Image: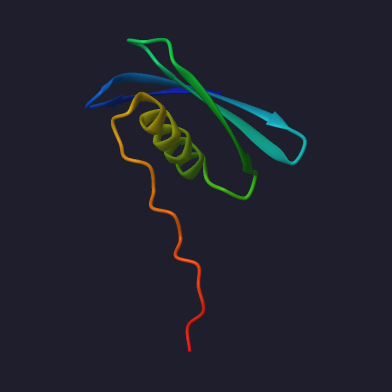
Amino acid sequence: MAGRDDSQSGRVFFEFAQLGQQMRVAAIDEATGTEVVVIAPLTATPHQMQQLALAKLRRRLGTEPPPRPPVIGKFA
């Protein structure tokens, strides 16, 4: 299964390939040819898988800041 997302940063192509009980989702930026891959459980919806791959691609391209790390410490 393949798809496209015409987001503000240009066109992004998606490729879905089932690997056992997981789905491999590739997101490819048309302008730069940059590709990222995520592995998602089959229980996720195609939209969730696509959004995860798109977020990773945007981080790779530098259009979205990386998520803040969790705060680790003791709380009473």
Instruction: Name the one closer to the observer, 75 or 19.
Output: 75
Residue 6 figure quarter: top left
Q: Quadrant of the N terminus?
A: top right
Horizontal side of 41 relative to 10 (left or right) equals: right
The percent position of residue 37, horizontal first and vertical second, equals: 56, 27
Q: Residue furthest left?
A: 8
Instruction: Name the one closer to the observer, 28 or 1.
Output: 28
Q: Residue furthest front?
A: 73
The percent position of residue 58, horizontal first and vertical second, equals: 36, 30
Asked if residue 17 is positioned above or below residue 40 in the image, the reply reads above
Asked if residue 28 is positioned above or below residue 39 in the image, the reply reads above
Residue 51 figure quarter: top left
The percent position of residue 59, horizontal first and vertical second, equals: 38, 33
Residue 47 figure quarter: top left
Rendered residue at 38%/52% (across/down)? 68
Rendered residue at 51%/24% (across/down)? 36
Instruction: Name the one closer to the observer, 63 or 26.
Output: 63
Horizontal side of 10 relative to 36 (left or right) equals: left
Instruction: Name the one closer to the observer, 19 or 33.
Output: 33
Horizontal side of 11 relative to 40 (left or right) equals: left
The percent position of residue 49, horizontal first and vertical second, equals: 51, 40
